[in-house]
Image: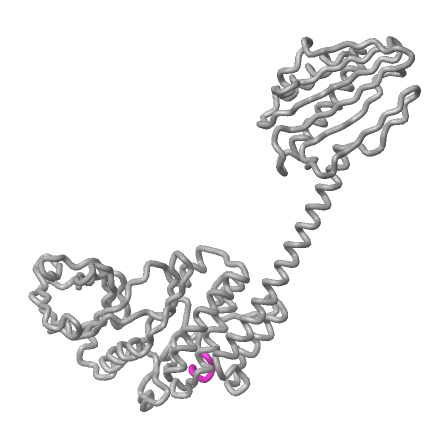
Amino acid sequence: FIMQHGRKEQLSITISHDVADDFYQFKEDGNYLYKNQAFESLLKKGGMSFLYLGVDPKDAKPIVIKVLSPRFIKSPEVIKRFLKEADIIRLSNHPNIIKLYGQGEWDHGLYIAMEFVQGISLKQFLLEKSLSVHKALEIILQVGYALCHLHTHGIIHRDLKPENILITENGQIKVIDFGIAALINEEKEDTSKRKSFIGTPVYMSPEQKEDPKKVTFSSDIYSLAVITYELLLGKLSFGVIHLSLIPKKLRQILEKALENDPKKRYQDIVDFITDLSEYLKSYTELEDTKSQENYDEIYSSLVNTDRLFLTKDMPTWKHLEIATEYDTTISSFGLYIDFFQLSENIFACILAKSENKDLESYIHTSIFRGYVKMAISIAKLKKEFSPANILSSINRAISDDLMDQKFFVNLIVMNLDKDQILYSNSFDSDAFFVDNSNEKCTNLSINN
């Protein structure tokens, strides 16, 4: 393994696992050597131990090495607890629990070699990011699966808190730090002389605060319920819990998990997992229903917008009858049809479509519709009714607009006073290229 230590004296370490006789030597520059490889950096300094980043020489993968602090070397109780942590991790083989790679002793202490997790603590994650209900419950369920595995092997964690839960970049959870974990059938430790808590008060059950010897599996469930509350709330609770802020059905689950009386609390983590899973399933189905309702609402809005662009009610013009026919098998996205009376006996009909046929085309077509109405208003004021003049006005507006959308346009102006139809279109070009050369004139006879 490769690690680093702050002391500057000659030390040696022997690893008692698969690489049992490998020799480590501490050099004056503060680096350990393993076959001429340098140890890496100190990760964390705790109250009872140091965490180092190391490298497994067998496959060059990073590992974490936990070294007992020198000041506890002569404390039988601390040494026993340190060695017990390795034994407990060894009993646990679960994807949501940190893995043990080895343990041993050196001239100046003890060490545990464990899996290196590329991630951050759940506490840091909670401080930096907000979580949806769905994501929060998925995280809690992973922790629940880890607890289920531990409890099956008779292990109580006793210090479950966000700092002792790691989350990787892909969302996988790893439960760590079994320094005060207990085996349910082991001899109870002597706490008569201990003045401090064993655990973290904010996440401890009432019975654990009163007497560490009274902890049961439900004590871990209590701790997990506090973490659940914090993830749902999106911030650390600091021991203050207001369940009224939690959705009703989920609140009922947490109320049971946070019962002060351990007998009224969930006795089995499986029951807690089951209730959370059922809630998550119903919540997901509800979200799907809401999504469908939102989709239906959007679709209904699009249909109404479609009606705005495709005039179904034909104008009742004197001396003229207008009719349209729609092919319902063809998408009408980006299609716009409208009719205008320019003067007493001059009428116009416009048919346009956007180049693209997507949701954005509705927005662009709405903008285009505004330009058309503006151009018609200008034509009425100036009494200039030729298609070229109207389309030129539209072109100028489009050229000044930032939208990246093309339109194909057909415009007919019918002048009953002159028995004349003026027709202009953009053919295969967009509306910007329509000019006077596109204008066509046809004389109308009485029979037409």
Q: Which residue is depicted at the point 46% across and 55% down?
A: 129
| Residue 164 appears in view | no
Q: Position of residue 152 (x, y in %)?
A: 40, 82
Q: Is residue 134 left or right of residue 332?
A: left
In the picture, residue 176 is in which quadrant? bottom left
Coloured how?
Answer: one colour
Q: Position of residue 185 (x, y in %)?
A: 35, 90
Q: Is residue 126 left or right of residue 56?
A: right
Observer-nearest of 168 and 179: 168
Residue 394 magenta-drawn? no
The C terminus - image quarter: top right
The N terminus - image quarter: bottom left
In the figure, 116 relative to 21: above or below? above
Residue 207 magenta-drawn? yes
Q: Which residue is depicted at the point 73% across and 25% down?
A: 351
Observer-nearest of 401 and 71: 401
Observer-nearest of 389 and 2: 389
| Residue 262 appears in view | yes
Main SS category, magenta section: helix
Q: Position of residue 253 (x, y in %)?
A: 57, 75
Residue range in magenta is 205-209
Q: Is residue 253 left or right of residue 146?
A: right
Q: Position of residue 383 (x, y in %)?
A: 81, 11
In the picture, residue 304 is in which quadrant? top right
Q: Is residue 67 left or right of residue 9?
A: right
